[in-house]
Every structure is written in structure tokens, then in C-alpha cells.
Image (tube, rainbow, N blue to C red):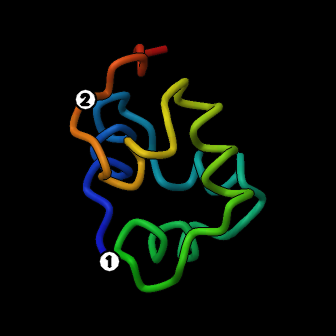
Amino acid sequence: MVFKNLRSIREDRDIRQREIAELLHISQNTYSQYETGAIALTAEVLITLADYYHCSVDYLLDRTEDPGFCPKR
């Protein structure tokens, strides 16, 4: 399953996959696979990303289109 909000929130902030991978202590390739849905996101990764972007896990998982409280940093 491809998570378009996960990719778009990163791109909207001009952040490279490598930077997010460093935050998560994983390789850039692993992070890329999260975005494309090749591998499943873990709860730990989702929570870390939601905290980093100041948004809900539902937004990152495309369960809502309303970024609501996802302010740009």
C-alpha cells in the first residue's frame, strides 16, 4: 500500500528521504520502501514520524486528507 501523504508531507517540507532515514536510524532504501508500501510501517516508526511532523498517524496512513495540525516546521 502506497502512502501518498507520507511522501507528500516530506516533499512539502523539502526534506530528503535520507534525512528521515537518519531520524529513524534506518537506511534510505528502507525508508523508500516504507513510502512505496514495499514493507510495512511499524507502530514505532509511525509514532516517530507523527511526532516529527506534528500530525496524526491517520494522516500519515491516508485515513484522512485533512492535515489539520501538521504545521510546516
Q: Position of residue 22 (x, y in %)?
A: 70, 52
State the residue in front, 67 or 13: 67
Q: Position of residue 11 (x, y in %)?
A: 31, 40
The amino acid beneath tag 1 is Met
The quadrant the N terminus occupies is bottom left
Residue 1 is labelled as: 1
Residue 15 is labelled as: none
Q: Position of residue 73 (x, y in %)?
A: 49, 14
Give the answer, above or below, for where 53 lies relative to 23.
Answer: above
Q: Nearer the viewer, mark 1 or mark 2?
A: 2
Q: For mark 1, does the 10 Å Cα neighbourhood hold few (<14), some (14 to 19), or many (20 or more) residues?
A: few
Q: Position of residue 58 (x, y in %)?
A: 43, 45
Q: N-terminal of the two: label 1 or label 2?
A: 1
Task: Determine whether the residue tagged by mark 2 lies in a helix, strand or loop.
Answer: loop
* Residue drawn where x is 51% and y is 83% of the image: 39
State the residue in front, 6 or 11: 6
The amino acid beneath tag 2 is Asp
Give the answer, above or below, for where 16 lies relative to 33.
Answer: above
* Residue drawn where x is 39% and y is 77% of the image: 37
Q: For mark 2, does the 10 Å Cα neighbourhood hold few (<14), some (14 to 19), or many (20 or more) residues?
A: few
Residue 66 is labelled as: 2
When asked about the image quadrant of residue 35, the answer is bottom left
* Residue drawn where x is 57% and y is 69% of the image: 41
Please give left or right for residue 61 compared with residue 34 in the image: left
When asked about the image quadrant of residue 10, the answer is top left
Please give left or right for residue 2 compared with residue 60 in the image: left
* Residue drawn where x is 46% and y is 77% of the image: 33
Q: CA distance from mark 1 to mark 2?
A: 19 Å
The number of numbered discs placed on residues in the rendered structure image is: 2
CB within 8 Å, label 1 to label 2: no
Please give left or right for residue 28 compared with residue 68 in the image: right
Give the answer, above or below, for where 63 lies relative to 29.
Answer: above
